Structures are given as C-alpha cells and as structure tokens.
Amino acid sequence: MKLGTAVATAIYLLSLQGAFAQEANDLAPPPPPEVEEEEADAPAQPAEKKKKLDYCGPMSKKVCDGIENIADIGRETWKVGAMGAALCSKSAAIESTRKRRKDRIEYEEQLARLAEDDETFRYTPWEPSETNTEFAQRTANECTSNKEYWCSEMQLAAADIMDPDVQAETLTLVETACAEE
C-alpha cells in the first residue's frame, strides 16, 4: 500500500513538473513599447580591445603600431597591409621563440634544484645548441633583417599604387613607420 502511494505520488509530481516545463517553453508576449524605447536609448557595449602582441624589438613595435590602420586609407593598400602583417607576424614569432627559450631555461633551473634536493630523482640537463649571447645576437639579426626586408617591400608596393593621393598617404605612413630613429 505504501509502495503504491509512493509510486502514485511520484507519477503525479513528474506530471506536474512536465506541465511547468511546458509553461516555460511557451512563447512570452512581446515587451511593452516603453521597454523597447529604453533599450534603444541604452549605450552600446564597447568593443573588446585586441590583445597587443609582443614584438621582437622597439623598432618592430613602432612599425607594427604605425601600419596597423593602413587598410583605412583605401582598397589599393591591401598589398602593403599584407606585407605589414607578415612583418608583424614574423616579429611576434621571434619574440615567442625568445619567450619559449627563457621559459625552458627557468624550467631547467627548477629541475636542477629539485634534483639536488631529491637524490632519487634522475635528471639529465638540457643543453641549448647555442649560448645565450649567440641566441640573442641571432634573434636580433633576424628581427632587424625582417624589418628591413618588409619595410623595403612595403615601400615598393606603396609606390605601385595607381591613385596618387592614396599612394602619397601610404608612402608617408610606411616611411614614418619604418624610419630609423
């Protein structure tokens, strides 16, 4: 008897839950006109800021910041903008390589300290293929040559633009961004 009452109660509760769920799925009436007017007056959400990438040096950062809005000049500047994007991408990749090496060195130092504390821990240290000085010199040279190459290519591409106003504005922007200080 108790079991039958419990089953009947459970079925009744489940049917009520289904009825409430059905009410939740029903379409709501449209909001009153006053609410729609308030929503129209509400300020728009500010656009999310793009995360700035780290570049391999202050000159590359200056170039990337300087040519960031080159597409705003006109449709003819797409080639210059693509070259600027290549410069910035390579620069960010060089900086990423530097960060990975730094992180790896710090990690290896931590492992070496752990190995000293725990005698049962076997540790074979990582030996980089080049010294820190050689690595810094190589990446600095890559950064400089990357900037020089893409800046010269951007200047050539800007000179090929047919519209004289767009060409002048683009050349000025590229020369300002790529100028050595």
Image: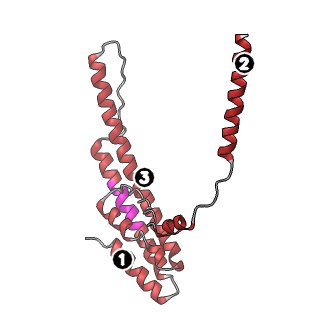
- Report which quarter residue 18 is drawn in: top right
For mark 2, what is the residue?
7
For marks 3 and 1 on the same chain, the one whose residue lies earlier in the sequence: 3
Disc 2 to disc 3: CB gap under 8 Å? no
Q: In this view, does 175 lie to the left or right of 24?
A: left
Mark 2 or mark 3, earlier in chain:
2
Reply above or below: 99 against 178. above
Marks 3 & 1, CB-CB < 8 Å contact: no
Residue 46 placement (x, y as % from top left):
42, 63
Residue 122 vertical position relative to residue 134 in the rendered view, above or below: above
The residue located at (38%, 62%) in the rendering is 145
Question: Which numbered dot is residue 69?
Answer: none
Quarter of the figure with the C terminus: bottom left
What residue lies at 35% left-to-right and 47% top-to-bottom? 98
Graded by Cα atoms within 10 Å as few (under 14), some (14 to 19) or many (20 or more), the crowding at tag 2 reads: few
Task: Give, as a three-letter code, the residue at label 1.
Answer: Glu
Residue in front for this viewpoint, 34 or 152: 34
Q: Residue furthest left?
A: 181
Which label belongs to residue 175? 1
Is there CB contact under 8 Å for labels 2 and 1?
A: no
Q: How crowded is mark 1: few (under 14 residues within 10 Å), some or many (20 or more)?
A: some
**Magenta stretch bounds:** 140-149
- Could you say whether the residue bearing mark 1 is in a helix, strand or loop? helix
Q: Which amino acid does label 3 sit on?
A: Ala
Q: For the residue marked with disc 2, what is the amino acid?
A: Val
Alpha carbon distance from label 2 to label 3: 66 Å
Q: In this view, does 154 lie to the left or right of 134?
A: right
Q: In the rendered image, which quarter is residue 172 located in?
A: bottom left
Question: Picture coordinates of residue 35 (x, y %)?
Answer: 52, 64
Residue at which label 3 appears:
93
Question: Disc 2 to disc 1, how far (Cα)?
Answer: 83 Å
Is residue 50 located in the magenta-colored stretch of the structure? no
